[in-house]
Amino acid sequence: MSNPSLLILPGDGIGPEVMTEVRKVIDWYGANRGLSFDVSEDLVGGAAYDAHGAPLSDETMARAQDADAVLLGAVGGPQYDVLDFSLKPERGLLRLRKEMDLFANLRPAQCFDALADFSSLKADVVGGLDIMIVRELTSGVYFGEPRGIHKEGNERVGINTQRYTESEIARVARSAFELARKRDNRVCSMEKANVMESGVLWRDVVTEIHAAEYSDVELSHMYADAGAMQLTRWPKQFDVIVTDNLFGDLLSDLAAMLTGSLGMLPSASLGAPMANGRPKALYEPVHGSAPDIAGQGKANPIACILSFAMALRYSFDQGEEATRLEDAVEAVLADGLRTADLIGEEGRAPVSTSEMGDAVLAKLTSSLS
Ligand code: IPM
Ligand code: MG
């Protein structure tokens, strides 16, 4: 049997440096756990625009469709701000999500004990936090039509459309309920049913799917604004949160910061199963391209390394190996190693991106003995 294929798209800014560390981890699994991948690399975002004049070429799109999993670094940079909307680096990422139909975006927010003091919230509010945000990723206001900026009389009007079909809501709700069953069995659905018809439909469909298929799971509903408030007040009340594309974008950044640094959080974007039974899948850190620190060895590679752990779990059925990698990260943090994003005013000197990667490898190796 041939090895599973992994397409790596490092992208822009700190993407390539954090991906270098992930490649070391991938190689470690090949050398030490008999888990080898056919790895190939390609361009996305500004890097693809610079090479081909488009943020994702058709050839790269086709390779992503064929891969068993895609691992992406980050896209974007200030030099691309002047580009037409359709050519911006972000469009490359949105095209991947849309054409691969990656409707369920899993964004775990876990607070490692060693980092509880880094959160802007009190340590007892975030210590031991373990929540999962399931964000709908292929519809809603990100993709709804009509959209654009046009002239009405003598002024311009900007339009975006929030649109959800029943089946789009139902499939992401199922993903959330399935995940909850493997966790604490609770789902909180967030929308704005008090002001938006799409929110009324969202609440109705989630309620129907729950009653028909998942009545063993505890379901609650919250308006998304109240949800944001509750996430900062007492985040541990949540297990799985399911929400739409735009609210999920906002709430997941909020949840990320509860854990101390955006540099820690991975994500998985999953679609329907392929012929080989694996879901269409793209894994990426939640942090962006951080152009201000790019190329200086300051970036934290942990979010990207943990994204590969999610790939092991959700694409390759290697839950134990995923846990091994997550434990290695936790052990490195417990030893006090910190990249620059995790250093407080009086903290000790930060380690570099590659030193952090090497430390994770060393913990992986010691996990074998
Ligand atoms: C995210 C990012 C993206 C989004 C951008 C880069 C298009 O903020 O993945 O959360 O808005 O979805
Ligand atoms: Mg975002």
Image (spheres, rainbow, N blue to C red):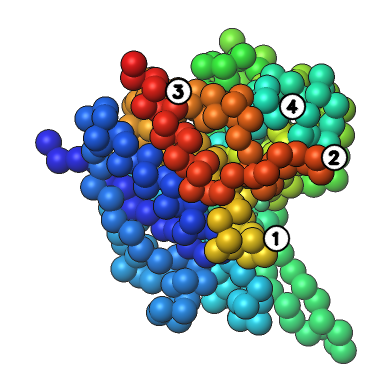
Left or right of 285? Residue 361 is left
Mark closer to the observer (1, 3) = 3
The residue nearer to you, when weighing 75 against 19, is: 19
Q: Earlier in the sequence, mark 1 or mark 4?
A: 4
**Along the line of sight, the residue nearer the viewer: 299 or 157:** 299
Question: Within the image, what quadrant is residue 294 found in?
Answer: bottom right
- Distance, label 1 to label 3, CA atoms, is 40 Å
Residue at image point 31% right, 47% down:
6
Three-letter amino acid code of the residue under disc 2: Asp
The secondary structure type at the circle numbered 2 is helix
**Against 185, is 25 above or below?**
below
Amino acid type, mark 3:
Thr
Neighbour tally class for label 2: few under 14, some 14-19, many 20 plus, Cα within 10 Å: some
Quarter holding the C terminus?
top left
Disc 3 marks which residue? 323
| Horizontal side of residue 1 vs 15, given as left or right | left
User: Looking at the image, is mark 1 or mark 2 earlier in the sequence?
Assistant: 1
* Label 1 – label 2 distance at C-alpha: 20 Å
Q: Position of residue 92 (x, y in %)?
A: 49, 65
The residue singled out by tag 2 in the image is 225
Q: Nearer the viewer, mark 1 or mark 4?
A: 4
